[in-house]
Amino acid sequence: MLDAPDLAAALMRQMPPSASVTRQFVTSCEALKRKRYTCKIELEREWDQPVHRKVAREALIDYYHQLASPPLSTVNLAQLGLSFVWRDSIAFRSRGVKDRSGVIERCNVIYNIGCASAGLGSDTLKLSSRAERAPLAKRHFEDAAGAFAEVRRVLQEDEMQRWRDDKKVNLELQPQALDALIHCMLAYAARCFY
């Protein structure tokens, strides 16, 4: 996952001491903290078994939903002063792109949902009979393509892009790499029926 301080604690520190903090906000922050920790644990596991990929994907979707839903979606993460880091896992160099706006955090979660979905699609093709596997595998590959397309869209729409340095940007965040992943996943989805 990301090397960042506890997001929920930082969100709570952002509230002025005199502000009335609603129970919903406190509960959301506590849930966010638990879900982020669950994601980190699931992503550190070996992804060699389909059950691990499925559990990780569900944990990531749950965490993203919490992050992107009110009341937390209304908070400007750039004001928190956190540094989110995306470490490159494709290239041989271990470099990290840093971001303070939260765009990298959201993209990281979506990207990992795409990776888990692609793995589930591949597992479905290997472990099921031909008749039952095609529709489910196709859906997993389409989900993966959609996740990678969403990462590309979010990165293109990010107005700040202070994290972007074309000489240092991770291979995974390059538009060409994301396009290749999208097309590859769509090709796998089409292949399920041919």
Image (tube, helix red, strand yellow):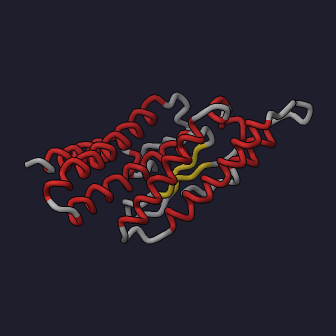
Viewer-proximal residue, 189 or 163?
Answer: 189
Residue 112, percent from left and from top: 43, 52
Q: Position of residue 159 (x, y in %)?
A: 52, 28
Q: Residue sitting at 59 percent across and 40 percent down?
A: 67
Q: Is residue 152 above or below residue 62?
A: above
Q: Position of residue 132 (x, y in %)?
A: 19, 54
* Residue 37 lies in quadrant: bottom right
Where is residue 102? Give x, y as percent.
59, 40
Between 83 and 5, the residue placed more toward the observer is 5
Q: Quick check: 8 left or right of 99?
A: right
The residue furthest left is: 194
**Is 5 displayed left or right of 118 in the figure?**
right
Query: Does 68 sit above or below residue 181?
Result: above
> How many numbered marks appear?
0
Residue under the image location 42 percent in, 61 percent down: 89
Question: Which residue is at 69% across, 54% downward?
Answer: 5
Q: Is residue 84 left or right of residue 183?
A: right
Q: Quadrant of residue 54?
A: bottom left
Point 51% across, 54% down: residue:
59
Q: Quadrant of the N terminus?
A: bottom right
